[in-house]
Amino acid sequence: MNENLEVIILAAGLGTRMKSSKIKILHRAAGRPIIDYVLDLASELSAQPPVMVIGHQREQVQQAVDSRARFAIQEEQLGTGHAVLQAAPHVDAAKRVLILSGDVPLTRRETLQRLLDEHAQSGNALTLLTMKPPDPGMYGRIVRDDSGSVQRIVEANDASEDEKRIDEVNAGIYVFDGAHLFDNLRNLSTNNAQGEYYLTDLLHTLRERGHRVGAVIADDPIEALGVNSRADLAQVDSEIQRRVVEKLMREGVTFRNPSTVVIDSTVTIGADTVIYPFVTIEGTTRIGRDCVIEPGVHLMNVQIADNVHVKTGTVAEDAIIEEEASVGPYAHLRPGSKLGRKVKVGNFVETKKAVFGEGAKASHLSYIGDAEVGAGVNIGAGTITCNYDGVRKNKTILEDGVFIGSDTQLVAPVRVGRGAYVGAGSTITKDVPPGALALSRTPQKTIEGWAERKKKG
Ligand code: UD1
Ligand code: CA
């Protein structure tokens, strides 16, 4: 954490190649807007909040970023040099200035630290991050002189054929001595192919004035990958997820086939939990220790305690599952579902706003909505809470130890008292007192020899 460092994040551009109505830095990768990853880096490196240069969709950006940054407005996007100049009034020019791009989220903190260390040791006025990607594409080319020192940056649009072949390019990340940054920025011109004020032109200016300029080459070019298109976004998304899974494995989580899972960077998973293939875990989901998450499970904002077994094909959202519960296969826990300790919710059971007490069971083919299910309750196959009367949602209360026979409809509002039984095939419209048996089906009629008589005619 550096007291003597200012961070500027350039984020005024819309990102037209995304073909989106939304500014690119608010597109999400692994569950968070990509700007969040850049803000994380800034807050890990500098003691004060970064200055974000914003323009397009500034209200949305300010709302999403909130107090994590200070803001400088760039009304018109006249180039990266012009953008940095807009931040000048907010920055203490006596400090070092690290410039990041809002659309470059994969840079590692260690790499930036290496850049800062090199800057401090070398006495450079500017130290920039470069990389050698497989295809230098539209990146600015790094022109070095015969002695190997960095001389200037030539943008792809302004480069000669020879210069286009240079394999080292500008990652768009820079450390400046503030004193040398802002004064020189005011002298930039727009005499180039794009008619923009290029921040990169400063390199040449500084050298001409006798200052030292240096570069650090990133080990892995993916660290400088900018999100300019949907293809870039997909690459960033999968790289962040790869890092998330790698980190979880270091923390003791087993993945049966790590390349098939989709896990947001916001998710936590405890040690000795086993994650099967084709699992998607999103949002604020937290999973405890020693759990098993079987194939095809989708979890969104679910809190799962230790020793929970979530079986194949289960979908859960905004739900809570306590210790030793078992869910699925093919269960659907909708928002407000809370399963207590050792609860079993089995195949093809749907729950919504339903709280299950310890050890309660609904093992097969049921809909339990707007319900309180007491401890030890046993809900038979095919039980339906009829919670909606066409106007209102009504509540079903099953007190502790209740037994509900299969194929029962519980017409809410209704309460079944402690320890009561409901016979199979019943439609329960009235409260059942504790300890009673309620039965509503018509008595069975049996006609002996009926089939034989029918055949005869
Ligand atoms: C820039 C560099 C190029 C480098 C590349 C790395 C310049 C002139 N070129 O090119 O050498 O290889 O980054 O990714 O700097 N922005 C503003 N206001 C503006 C213009 C840009 O805030 O007026 C922001 C953008 O939103 C973006 C960042 O600055 O976050 C970079 O701008 P972009 O247009 O993507 O620069 P490149 O053309 O990629
Ligand atoms: Ca550009």
Image (spheres, helix red, strand yellow):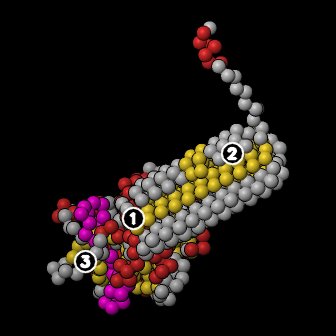
- In three-dimensional space, the C-alpha distance between marks 2 and 1, rounded to whole angstroms, equals 40 Å
* Callout 2: CB less than 8 Å from ligand 1: no
- Kindly indicate the quadrant of the structure image that contains residue 145: bottom left
Mark 3 belongs to which amino acid? Gln
Mark 2 belongs to which amino acid? Gly
Task: Choose the circle earlier in sequence order: 3 or 2.
Answer: 3
SS under mark 3: strand
SS under mark 2: loop
Q: Residue at x 49, y 83 (%)?
A: 46
Counting labels gives: 3
Residue 75, image x, y percentages: 53, 63
Q: Which residue is drawn at 43% across and 75% down?
A: 251
> Mark 1 = which residue?
255
Magenta residues span 115-141
Instruction: Determine which of the numbered discs, if any, sits on residue 405 in the image.
Output: 2
Q: Is residue 293 above or below residue 8?
A: above
Of the residues tagged 3 and 2, which is closer to the observer?
2
Task: Choose the circle earlier in sequence order: 2 or 1.
Answer: 1
Query: Is 189 on the left-hand or right-hand side of 216?
Result: right
> Mark 3 = which residue?
151
Q: Report if the CB atoms under discs 2 and 1 are less than 8 Å apart.
A: no
Report the front residue among 280 and 358.
Answer: 358
Q: In which quarter of the image is the C terminus?
A: top right
Q: Report if the CB atoms under discs 1 and 3 are less than 8 Å apart.
A: no
Residue 29, image x, y percentages: 46, 61
Of the residues tagged 1 and 3, which is closer to the observer?
1
> Is 132 covered by the magenta stretch?
yes
Q: Which residue is drawn at 65% across and 47% down?
A: 380
